[in-house]
Amino acid sequence: MEETEVKRKVLPAVTIAALFFVGLATVFAASASEISPENIISAINRERESVGLSPLNTNQNLNQAAYAKSSDMLARNYFEHYAYGLTPWMFIIRSGYEYSVAGENLAKGFSTSEDIVKAWMESPTHRQNILNPEYQDIGVGVVQGVYSENGEITETTLTTEMSAKPKSPIVQFFGRITAALSGIFGQ
């Protein structure tokens, strides 16, 4: 075979093999590194179930609250539970979720959902939030963007996890009645 003919036959086969392995590596990297609310909730529920607790139900209001908190932290460049006069509970209330008990976990700079949950489980206070038997619902907000810390600007991922138990329907009902009467008769 001539050199040109070998190149013509071998080069496409090598190219296809290379693309296959690059694609395969990308698939494995993407599944291992994707930080998403769904992956975090699944990992948290696995932790809860491993100790005999019920899994948490995904709640859209808590998802909205958690996303709003992550977005606010990125926009204002902070990484704290309490900042700018805001509490985690304000984000939950603004979402329309009426809670009786709630908790929040934050994460910054991780590359996988599993690493986030592992770090939370290694921290006593975060672990306590994840394994709180009172919680019934969960929401997670993940945002990516530019964050500045100690004069260093980096591209990062901020994650907020909020778990809660709703107020009982009767308490919610009387709360609405009280609010309506306050509106009628003034504060």
Image (cartoon, helix red, strand yellow):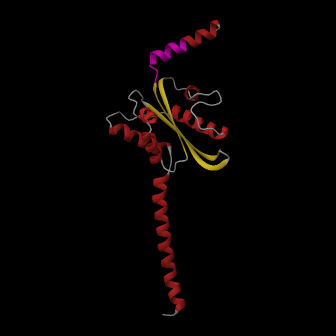
The relative height of residue 177 versus residue 108 in the rendered view (above or below) is: above
- Looking at this view, is 61 or 54 the one in front? 54
Magenta run includes residue 171:
yes
- Looking at this view, is 34 or 168 the one in front? 34
Residue at the image position 50 percent from the left and 45 percent from the top: 36
In the displayed orientation, state which residue is furthest to the front: 150
Residue at the image position 63 percent from the left and 11 percent from the top: 183
Figure disc tally: 0
- Percent across and percent down for residue 132 are 40, 30
Magenta segment boundaries in residue numbering: 166-177
* Res. 4 image quadrant: bottom right
- Looking at this view, is 85 or 63 the one in front? 85
Image position of 152 (left or right of 34): right
Residue at the image position 59 percent from the left and 9 percent from the top: 181
In the displayed orientation, state which residue is furthest to the left: 52
The relative height of residue 78 versus residue 184 in the rendered view (above or below) is: below
Q: Examine the residues drawn in magenta and state their main secondary structure.
A: helix
- Percent across and percent down for residue 131 are 39, 33
- Percent across and percent down for residue 24 are 46, 64
Magenta run includes residue 50:
no
Which corner quadrant holds the C terminus?
top right
- Percent across and percent down for residue 81 are 56, 32
In the displayed orientation, state which residue is furthest to the bottom: 2
Image position of 67 (left or right of 100): right
Residue at the image position 47 percent from the left and 15 percent from the top: 171
